[in-house]
Image: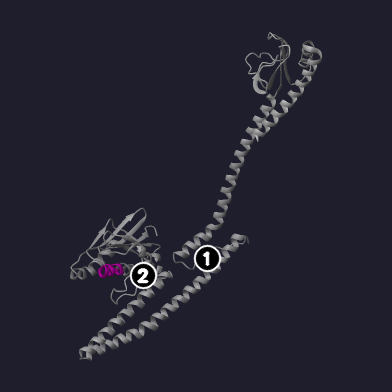
């Protein structure tokens, strides 16, 4: 804006100066230098109130009339230039546009217009604009901050409720809000959705319990019958068939139990069974269970714990998850199996690592899917549920599962928050 105003001021000042120059040149052409001198004397008289800057000198450079106090140092030219000069009777130089015109007799006519007041006004306007802009930015920032805080405060109850629901407390609801605005309607919709989720989870719990009863009971009876049959058969072929049937029944029962554990964990069931547990003691117990198996395999299982940590967990599910990882390391890994526990930056990492072939990076995401088997040639045991159970148990504890390269081998880490 300042540049536009300066351009307009320049154009107006030059237009006024050009008009004066044309008038004075007409007077000069009609009456010569004396007439021009008289006209300039009249126009620059103190009583004229004219903002013009005029000066005329003879061929020798002697001033004849005008109100330009000193011009010897001024860069006078045939075109108008902005300069700082002193008018007669003034103490402070002023901004003005000046132009020099050479007269036929050798004299010099200087014409121009003072623009000091315009320049001061434009500078003041620019400063005021900058101040206004700065205040506008500050006000906008303050308004945005206040608006953000108001929105966050209105949403905080909803955010808190959803966080508690995510952790497994399905009974929590957003507090009632009588304002009737969009935030109140959002809270109502969230509560209705949570009511539906809670109902579905209750139905799921009933369904899983029914499934466990309907499937496990007949399978258990069948297994008992097979055990009785195994005791009475004598033919080798029949004994082999019974042993195979028993193995398959055990596999089916284990698969059903694992699938039910995954379903319950994914539904957030079991958080009421969380109890403070010494993780180092838990890992030591697992080591004791698997040490004889590893010894029979001619391998070793060791533990590394950076510190003793007590954390509220579902002990049975966590034991099962870590046990699955050790089972996988025994069946599909090689070398020494290492159970480690490291606390760092508010997190605890429980990892099981082996020295086998590992899992290629591009297959690790698939390995965590339910019923995913990366190598169909790996015997008939297992249903691809082991890592799925580990992930479900980790999520139940608000944690994550990470598959890492152990160089060589695979490291499966369960990462939990220390402040859960």
- In the picture, the disc for residue 188 is none
Q: Is residue 296 above or below residue 64?
A: below
Magenta stretch contains residue 82:
no
Q: Is residue 248 above or below residue 192?
A: below
| Residue furthest out toward the front | 104
Q: How crowded is mark 2: few (under 14 residues within 10 Å), some or many (20 or more)?
A: many
Q: Where does the magenta region start and end? A: 323-332
Which of the image's four quarters has the C terminus?
Answer: bottom left
Which of the image's four quarters has the N terminus?
Answer: top right
- In the picture, the disc for residue 389 is 2
Q: Position of residue 347 (x, y in %)?
A: 36, 56
Q: Where is residue 29 in the image (x, y as percent from the top left)?
A: 79, 16
- In the picture, the disc for residue 173 is 1
Task: Considering the whole magenta stretch, tell me its main secondary structure.
Answer: helix
Residue at 52% in and 65% down: 173
Pick the front one: 113 or 354: 113
Q: In this view, does 145 lie to the left or right of 254?
A: right
């Amino acid at each position: 804006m300042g540049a536009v105003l300066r351009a307009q001021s320049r154009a107006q000042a030059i237009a006024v100066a050009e008009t004066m120059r044309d008038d004075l040149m007409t007077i000069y052409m009609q009456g010569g230098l004396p007439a021009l001198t008289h006209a300039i004397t009249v126009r620059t008289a103190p009583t004229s109130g004219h903002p013009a800057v005029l000066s005329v000198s003879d061929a020798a450079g002697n001033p004849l009339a005008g109100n330009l106090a000193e011009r010897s140092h001024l860069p006078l030219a045939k075109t108008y230039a902005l300069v700082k000069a002193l008018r007669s009777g003034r103490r402070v130089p002023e901004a003005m546009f000046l132009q020099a015109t050479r007269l036929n007799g050798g004299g010099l006519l200087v014409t121009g217009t003072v623009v000091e007041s315009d320049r001061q006004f434009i500078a003041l306007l620019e400063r005021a604009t900058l101040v206004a802009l700065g205040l506008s930015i500050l006000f906008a920032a303050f308004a945005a901050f206040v608006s953000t805080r108001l929105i966050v405060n209105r949403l905080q109850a909803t955010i808190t409720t959803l966080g508690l629901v995510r952790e497994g407390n399905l009974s929590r609801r957003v507090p009632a809000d009588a304002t009737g605005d969009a935030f109140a309607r959002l809270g109502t919709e969230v509560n209705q959705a949570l009511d539906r989720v809670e109902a579905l989870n209750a139905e799921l719990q009933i369904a899983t319990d029914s499934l466990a009863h309907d499937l496990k009971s007949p399978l258990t009876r069948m297994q008992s019958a097979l055990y009785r049959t195994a005791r009475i058969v004598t033919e080798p072929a029949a004994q082999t068939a019974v042993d195979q049937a028993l193995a398959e029944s055990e596999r089916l029962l284990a698969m059903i139990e694992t699938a039910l554990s995954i379903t319950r964990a994914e539904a957030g069931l079991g958080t009421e069974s969380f109890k403070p547990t010494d993780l180092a003691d838990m890992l030591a117990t697992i080591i004791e269970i698997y040490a004889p198996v590893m010894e029979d395999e001619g391998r070793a299982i060791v533990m590394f714990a950076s510190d003793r940590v007590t954390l509220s967990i579902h002990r049975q599910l966590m034991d099962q998850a870590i046990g699955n990882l050790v089972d996988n390391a025994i069946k599909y890994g090689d070398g020494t199996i290492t159970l480690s526990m490291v606390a760092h930056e508010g997190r605890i990492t429980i990892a099981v690592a082996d020295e086998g072939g590992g899992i290629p990076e591009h297959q690790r995401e698939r390995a965590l899917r339910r019923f995913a088997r990366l190598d169909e040639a790996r015997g008939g045991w297992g249903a691809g549920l082991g890592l799925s159970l580990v992930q479900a148990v980790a999520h139940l504890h608000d944690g994550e599962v990470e598959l890492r390269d152990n160089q060589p081998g695979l490291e499966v880490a369960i990462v939990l928050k220390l402040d859960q």
